[in-house]
């Protein structure tokens, strides 16, 4: 790891404060953190295990679900273990290298998560609008190629964040009022001009999340248009049911993320601990809820999971 230019007197470690203002309640706050994280690991690893073991589930839809589960594990594991160390053992120190590494992986996993939701939306589009050509359009090999594109896109957009922070001089104050190394939380500790950091962070949110939401909306406009052309009401219901699960996952994933980003930049009247709690919801709720949503709403997957549970 190279030596970071944080000025000669710059800190070698940062201090993560957890949730300032609620220090006395850290132990109580850690209970939902730990439970949500435990359930998210259990749910996502169960999905991965069942999909890998069952050859009948080796289809594009379920391969995408595996990718989603991996990014959910990655995002929550980038944040929650360190947060629990702060809450339980008061281990607030984190090295500069560790802080920037955490930032890269958690934001990178978030960008990958958003891209996978786009892929899942178009998977539903091809399944409904081109059912006879679906197997030739979306092959497993093509899904793997698209997954690689997601990884490269995340690296392309997120790598500049720690690189832009390296050039900044940091003040004597090296306390981060947060549970993890968020890009803007670290940038605000600098004594230098962080206009570029602010601008680039906002560009990533607008371009990545904004573009992804536009593509998802486009896919559903095309789906609705195709469904309206079907005369059978039963076919209507079946087609829309295939999209319900994905829409629920989009809402649980993007709503906390967008709300947190907007309040962090524009909600100056909101208490700091509210900002931090909202930011943590993105790493707690979607990873826990996504396996439940897919397990309940997808009959084929539900049956396979039930088979393994009944064996036990």
Image: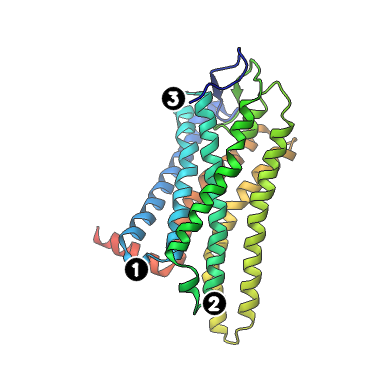
Q: Quadrant of residue 7?
A: top right
Q: Nearer the viewer, mark 1 or mark 2?
A: 2
Q: Quadrant of residue 249?
A: bottom right
Q: Which residue is mark 1?
A: 56
Q: Is residue 117 visible?
A: yes
Q: Which residue is mark 3?
A: 89
> For the residue carrying disc 3, how many other residues have a C-alpha within 10 Å: few (<14), some (14-19), or many (20+)?
few
Q: Looking at the image, tell me whether mark 1 or mark 2 is earlier in sequence order.
A: 1
> For the residue carrying disc 2, how many other residues have a C-alpha within 10 Å: few (<14), some (14-19), or many (20+)?
few
| Residue with the most extreme left position | 311
Q: CA distance from mark 1 to mark 2?
A: 21 Å
Helix, strand or loop at mark 1: helix
In the image, taking residue 140 as reference, residue 274 lies left or right, namely right
Asked whether the beta carbons under mark 1 and mark 2 sit within 8 Å of each other, the answer is no
Split into 4 quadrants, where in the image is the C terminus?
bottom left
Asked whether the beta carbons under mark 3 and mark 2 sit within 8 Å of each other, the answer is no
Q: Which residue is mark 2?
A: 130
């Amino acid at each position: 790891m190279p030596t970071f230019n944080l000025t000669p007197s710059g800190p070698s470690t940062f201090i993560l404060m957890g949730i300032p203002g609620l220090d006395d309640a850290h132990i109580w706050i850690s209970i939902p953190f730990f439970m949500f994280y435990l359930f998210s690991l259990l749910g996502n690893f169960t999905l991965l295990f069942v999909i890998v073991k069952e050859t009948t589930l080796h289809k594009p839809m379920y391969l995408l679900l595996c990718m989603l589960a991996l990014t959910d594990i990655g995002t929550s594991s980038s944040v929650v273990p360190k947060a629990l160390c702060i809450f339980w053992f008061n281990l607030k120190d984190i090295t500069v290298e560790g802080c920037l590494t955490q930032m890269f992986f958690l934001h990178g996993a978030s960008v990958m998560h958003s891209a996978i939701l786009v892929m899942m939306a178009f998977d539903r589009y091809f399944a409904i609008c081109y059912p006879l050509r679906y197997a030739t359009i979306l092959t497993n090999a093509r899904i793997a190629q698209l997954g690689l594109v997601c990884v490269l896109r995340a690296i392309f957009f997120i790598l500049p964040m720690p690189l832009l922070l390296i050039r900044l001089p940091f003040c004597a104050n090296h306390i981060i009022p947060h549970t993890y190394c968020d890009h803007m939380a670290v940038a605000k500790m600098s004594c230098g001009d962080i206009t570029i950091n602010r601008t680039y962070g906002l560009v990533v949110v607008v371009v990545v999340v904004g573009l992804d939401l536009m593509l998802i909306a486009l896919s559903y406009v095309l789906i609705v248009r195709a469904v309206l052309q079907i005369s059978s009401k039963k076919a209507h219901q079946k087609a829309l049911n295939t999209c319900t699960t994905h829409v629920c996952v989009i809402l649980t994933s993007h709503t906390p993320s967008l709300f947190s980003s907007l309040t962090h930049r524009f909600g100056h009247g909101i208490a700091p601990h509210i900002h931090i709690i909202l930011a943590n919801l993105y790493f707690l709720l979607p990873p826990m809820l996504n396996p439940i949503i897919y397990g309940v709403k997808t009959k084929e997957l539900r049956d396979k999971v039930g088979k393994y549970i009944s064996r036990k």
